[in-house]
Amino acid sequence: MKKAVLALAVACSGFLMNQVAQAQEGIDIVPYAEVGTVGYQLTFDGSVPLPDGTFIETENSFNFDMLDFTVGAVASMGKFYANVNYRGTDEDSDDQIIPGLPTIKWSGDRQEWSAAFGYNLADQINVFAGYRDSLTEGSSIAASEYSFEHDGYFLGASYRIPITESGGLTLSVGHAWLDCEIEETLYGFEVPPANGDGSGIKFGISWRAALTEKWGYSVGVERFDYDYDLSGEGVRVDVEEIETSISVGMFYVL
């Protein structure tokens, strides 16, 4: 696994961002934590070599429904801010069917480091850029394992709609450009790794509001859809990665 620890947090605006971006002097720090559910789909379509030296055309999808958690912090000075966080999930399982091989029952999870750097253009508008590194791993009792990792950069913007004196809705969108790699072992046979790149869009909508002078809460929905083209020694595969998440969280202004 690559050791990059900075990555994208696309929905890093809203009440939280507007609160800290209002500071004109000094640095404000706002730690936060979120929990939720995520529906994750990873689809492979292409040619894969088999242990006997032949190749097959196959299409498979991993579908995971997982609990996830995020911890992070926002630092701001004037109109500039930075957001760094870590996200992880619990484990879920799904089956993979490859013609000519027994069905493989995978158990997998995901983890991601992220960071974004942004600027408050106006009271309700933020623009941001960042970097992300995400890893999906799976294993099976049948001497099989896989990993799918992507990392890269993104640009985005968000717009907040005030609803009450203490809270409002935030709409965000970002576009990411990512490098990726797949490594897989099937019944003890190491499939040649495949590398490539791709891109995609992430959308988010969230409600953020203050509970007290220091404490606040958030409720959000995010969805991304990324497409990749990968190739390697005897491997050619198109990958689609789709995720939809729902989360609730708390933040605290230090």
Image (cartoon, rainbow, N blue to C red):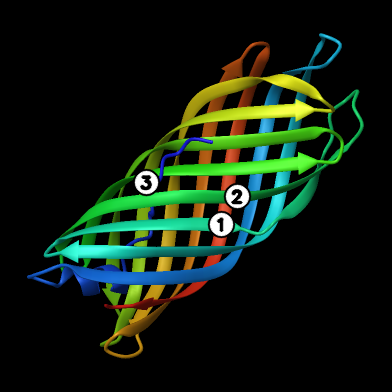
Q: What residue sits 40% from the left and 50% below the top?
A: 114
Q: Which residue is mark 1?
A: 88
Of the two numbered discs 3 and 1 on the same chain, state the one appearing first in sequence.
3
Residue at 87% of width from left, 36% of height from top? 142
Residue under numbered circle 3? 6
For mark 2, give the secondary structure: strand
Per the image, the residue denoted by label 2 is: 110
Residue count near mark 3 (Cα–Cα under 10 Å), binned few <14, some 14–19, many ≥20: many
Three-letter residue code for mark 1: Gly
Query: Where's residue 209, x and y in %?
Result: 35, 81
Label located before the other in sequence (2 or 1): 1
Q: Amino acid at mark 3?
A: Leu
Q: Quadrant of the C terminus?
A: bottom left
Point 34% across, 68% down: residue: 170
Q: Dot 2: few (<14), some (14–19), or many (≥20) neighbours within 10 Å?
A: many
* Inter-mark Cα distance, 2 to 1: 6 Å
